[in-house]
């Protein structure tokens, strides 16, 4: 995994991919949906609002309520939930679900994912 992460960093640098190219309204809404689907965290709200602000993307606290109201709870993970994140299989979570079609609010556009 570390080697893959290192290779990804090299690919991103070679492509001259910058944070402001990938931090879009759609990307932030996907992040909000992912947080909501896994039990949520108040820290995520604070961090995503700060990231949006730095990237110049309009986002406010009401967006979290609007988006999370439409997202099913897939895993009740801590800190807000009851299950530990270091044991995803124990709560029915499987890595393949992360990439399952239809799980995102918006189709990814630009991303540094392999």
Image (cartoon, rainbow, N blue to C red):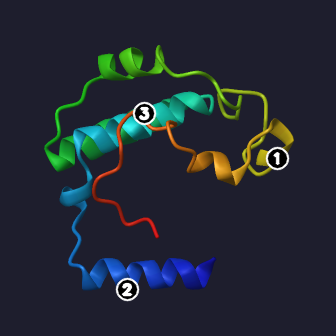
Residue 4 x/y as whole percent: 55, 80
As drawn, the residue found furthest toward the right would be: 90
Residue 63 x/y as whole percent: 31, 21
Give me the disc on residue 67.
Answer: none
As drawn, the residue found furthest toward the left would be: 56
Which class describes the residues within 10 Å of circle 3: few (<14), some (14-19), or many (20+)?
many
- Counting residues from the start of the chain, the first of labels 3 and 1 encountered is 3
The residue beneath circle 3 is 32
The residue beneath circle 2 is 10
Above or below residue 111? Residue 8 is below
Residue depicted at x 26% and y 24%: 60
What separation in Å lies between label 2 and label 1 (alpha carbons)?
Answer: 31 Å
In the figure, residue 81 lies in which quadrant? top right
Drawn side of residue 114 relative to residue 52, left or right: right
Considering depth in this image, is 64 or 8 the residue closer to the camera?
8
In the figure, residue 24 lies in which quadrant? top left
Quarter of the figure that contains the N terminus:
bottom right
Confirm whether residue 8 shows in the render: yes
Considering depth in this image, is 61 or 96 the residue closer to the camera?
96
Residue 107 x/y as whole percent: 36, 44
At numbered mark 1, what does the secondary structure look like: helix, strand or loop? helix
In the figure, residue 16 lies in which quadrant? bottom left
What separation in Å lies between label 2 and label 3 (alpha carbons)?
Answer: 28 Å
What separation in Å lies between label 3 and label 1 (alpha carbons)?
Answer: 22 Å
Disc 2, disc 3: CB below 8 Å?
A: no
Residue depicted at x 81% and y 37%: 91
- Counting residues from the start of the chain, the first of labels 2 and 3 encountered is 2
Which class describes the residues within 10 Å of circle 1: few (<14), some (14-19), or many (20+)?
few
- Counting residues from the start of the chain, the first of labels 2 and 1 encountered is 2
Drawn side of residue 26 relative to residue 97, left or right: left
Give me the disc on residue 89.
Answer: 1
């Amino acid at each position: 995994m570390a080697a893959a992460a290192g290779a990804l960093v090299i690919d991103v640098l070679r492509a001259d991919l910058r944070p402001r190219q990938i931090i879009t309204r759609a990307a932030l809404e996907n992040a909000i949906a992912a947080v909501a689907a896994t039990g949520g965290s108040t820290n995520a709200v604070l961090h995503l609002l700060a990231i949006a602000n730095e990237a110049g993307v309009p986002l406010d606290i009401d967006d979290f309520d609007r988006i999370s109201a439409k997202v099913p709870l897939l895993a009740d993970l801590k800190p807000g939930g009851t299950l530990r994140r270091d044991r995803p299989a124990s709560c029915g979570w499987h890595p393949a679900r992360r990439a399952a079609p239809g799980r995102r609010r918006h189709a990814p556009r630009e991303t540094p994912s392999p």
